[in-house]
Image: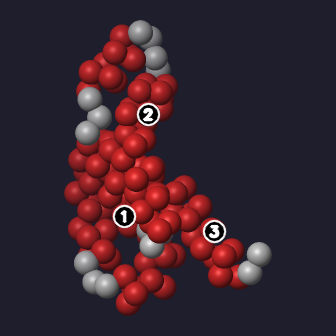
Amino acid sequence: MNETAYAFISGIVAAVVIDIPTGFLMGKIRLVDELLLPWIKVFLSPPLTALVPMQMVPFGFGIIILNARAGALQINRSMTDMARSFGAYPWDALMKACFRDALPEILGGVIRAAKG
């Protein structure tokens, strides 16, 4: 595998591992959203080609964060309540009900980031 492909794949993996949990937390915890959203928007507003070296290392692909945030914001609260009423622990309710509900939006961001 050449170096460019390796850098691209490792960048996608790093972005997915960092950005999806960050975006999900932003969608669920208002304080995290208020702290991080301005910084993410700052790095997404200029042309990406100007910021690629700076953006790839600390933020991965910012679009994945925004899509994960959007997915977390659209989760139906009744899904979490239903999981909790059936005895699910908070982590189980988050992963089995909330994450699955947000997954289409998250995957849309991953695909969009991979296309460039």
CB contact under 8 Å: marks 1 and 3: no
Residue wearing tag 1: 63
The first of marks 2 and 1 along the sequence is: 1
* Left or right: 30 as drawn, with respect to 116: left
Q: How far across and down, in percent of the image, does residue 46 sit?
A: 28, 83
Other-residue count near label 2 (Cα within 10 Å), few / some / many at <14 / 14–19 / ≥20 = some
> Which residue does the image show at 54% across and 55% down from the upper left?
17
| CA distance for labels 2 and 1 | 19 Å
> Which residue does the image show at 49% across and 76% down from the upper left?
56
Q: Where is 39 relative to 20, above or below? A: below
Q: In which quarter of the view is residue 1 placed?
A: bottom right
Residue wearing tag 3: 10
Report the residue that reaches farthest toward the front. 115
The amino acid marked with disc number 1 is: Ile
Q: How far across and down, in percent of the image, does residue 49 sit?
A: 40, 87
Label number found at residue 100: 2
Other-residue count near label 3 (Cα within 10 Å), few / some / many at <14 / 14–19 / ≥20 = few
The first of marks 1 and 3 along the sequence is: 3
Q: How far across and down, in percent of the image, does residue 106 sit?
A: 41, 49
The amino acid marked with disc number 3 is: Ser
| CA distance for labels 1 and 3 | 17 Å
Report the residue that reaches farthest toward the bottom. 50
Q: Secondary structure at mark 1?
A: helix
* Left or right: 31 as drawn, with respect to 50: left
The first of marks 2 and 3 along the sequence is: 3
